[in-house]
């Protein structure tokens, strides 16, 4: 381009600097495994990544995040209002951040109960369509997600100016950690959300067993165990012998055999452990949707026509009340 007196002038093209905002879910100051998987998905998108941590112990969590080399910035909202991750407060905060930073083109969150609660609210407030529970990143605007209880995969392309995505943690490996990096940490003040909801109380099930969502081994029980007492008598020793987390089918949960936090399936937790042992579970399509990506599936059921055998790598047809105690004993004897 020729300018004054025939001199050539440089033309500078101003363009938007794309970036990804990744919400980091924590339990106290501990970052959840699903959040590390979310950061892996964020890396695959290819933008600079800004992590968001909230709650009264957010600063401690931010220190742990410095081991993630992919981060360009960490936003910290050290406000006790966020200790219980109420979706009304979270959605207002995320919307405020997105509206103030025009570089943000993607917002990612784990597809946990927390993420599933606040991301649709963000979509409603920003007039955007979230893409939920993705299992693969094809490109910056194209993603794969399961539909029809996992029996089909849909490839979804978004044209939204800000793309909202929740990540199925079991489909992405946790991001690699390294020595602590120098990462910019920015304190962010939460806006007034006008939230009429308030936290009242909670009852948490505590256990020394591995976390169900991230365990390498899972032992799940179904309706075939017949009672809460028999569920405990058979499933707990087997899980202990394998150092496994305990899961359950919806039928077992609905029958009161165990707490609903242990439910595996379409309306429960989605898991993909190295080993999944299904005891007395028939294999309804909703349950299969939550565990069929497990590396090795072992099914124990007296009904040889049970659908669970269609996805099992190892199937044992027999009376679980005889098979499970014998299996537990053999595992213990082999140690």
Image (spheres, rainbow, N blue to C red):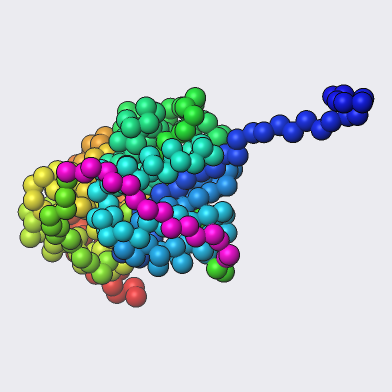
* Residue sitting nearer the eye, 197 or 222: 197
Number of labels in the image equals 0
Quarter-of-image position of residue 139: top right
* Magenta span contains residue 16: no
The spot of residue 179 in percent (x, y) is 57, 69
Say above or below: 74 vs 329. Answer: above
Say above or below: 70 vs 335. Answer: above
Quarter-of-image position of residue 250: top left
Residue shown at 46% from the left, 67% from the top? 63
Residue 164 visible in the picture: yes
The spot of residue 191 in percent (x, y) is 33, 47
Q: Main secondary structure of the magenta part?
A: loop
* Residue sitting nearer the eye, 47 or 208: 47
The spot of residue 98 in percent (x, y) is 44, 40
Q: Is residue 227 left or right of residue 216?
A: left
* Residue sitting nearer the eye, 52 or 244: 52
Q: Quadrant of the C terminus?
A: bottom left
Q: Quadrant of the N terminus?
A: top right
* Residue sitting nearer the eye, 157 or 325: 157
Q: Is residue 85 left or right of residue 136?
A: left
Q: Is residue 183 left or right of residue 95?
A: right
Q: Residue furthest right?
A: 6
The spot of residue 62 in percent (x, y) is 44, 63
Residue shown at 16% from the left, 53% from the top? 199
Residue shown at 64% from the left, 33% from the top? 15
The residue range painted magenta reads 181-196
Q: Residue furthest front?
A: 5
Residue shown at 12% from the left, 55% from the top? 200
Residue 35 visible in the picture: no
């Amino acid at each position: 381009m020729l300018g004054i007196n025939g001199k050539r002038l440089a033309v500078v093209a101003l363009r938007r600097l794309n970036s990804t905002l990744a919400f980091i879910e924590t339990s106290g100051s501990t970052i959840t495994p699903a959040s590390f998987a979310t950061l892996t998905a964020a890396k695959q998108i290819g933008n600079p990544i800004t992590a968001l941590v909230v709650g009264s112990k957010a600063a401690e969590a931010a220190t742990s995040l410095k081991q993630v080399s992919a981060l360009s910035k960490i936003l910290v909202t050290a406000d006790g209002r966020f200790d219980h991750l109420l979706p009304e407060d979270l959605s207002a905060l995320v919307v405020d951040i997105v509206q103030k930073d025009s570089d943000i083109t993607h917002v990612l969150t784990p597809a946990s109960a927390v993420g599933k609660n606040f991301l649709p609210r963000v979509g409603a407030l920003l007039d955007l369509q979230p893409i939920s529970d993705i299992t693969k990143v094809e490109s910056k605007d194209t993603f794969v997600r399961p539909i029809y209880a996992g029996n089909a995969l849909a490839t979804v392309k978004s044209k939204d100016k800000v793309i909202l995505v929740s990540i199925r943690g079991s489909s992405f490996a946790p991001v690699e950690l390294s020595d602590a990096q120098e990462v910019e940490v920015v304190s962010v003040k939460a806006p007034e959300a006008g939230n009429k909801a308030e936290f009242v109380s909670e009852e948490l099930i505590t256990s020394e067993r591995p976390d169900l969502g991230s365990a390498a081994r899972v032992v799940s029980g179904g309706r075939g165990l017949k009672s809460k007492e028999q569920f405990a008598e058979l499933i707990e020793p087997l899980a202990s012998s394998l150092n496994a987390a305990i899961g359950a089918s919806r039928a077992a949960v609905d029958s009161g055999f165990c707490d609903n936090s242990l439910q595996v399936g379409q309306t429960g937790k989605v898991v993909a452990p190295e080993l999944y042992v299904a005891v007395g579970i028939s294999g309804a399509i909703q349950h299969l949707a939550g565990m069929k990506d497990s590396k090795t599936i072992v099914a124990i059921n007296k009904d040889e026509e049970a659908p669970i055998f269609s996805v099992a790598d190892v199937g044992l047809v027999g009376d679980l009340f005889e098979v499970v105690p014998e299996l537990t004993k053999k595992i213990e004897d082999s140690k």
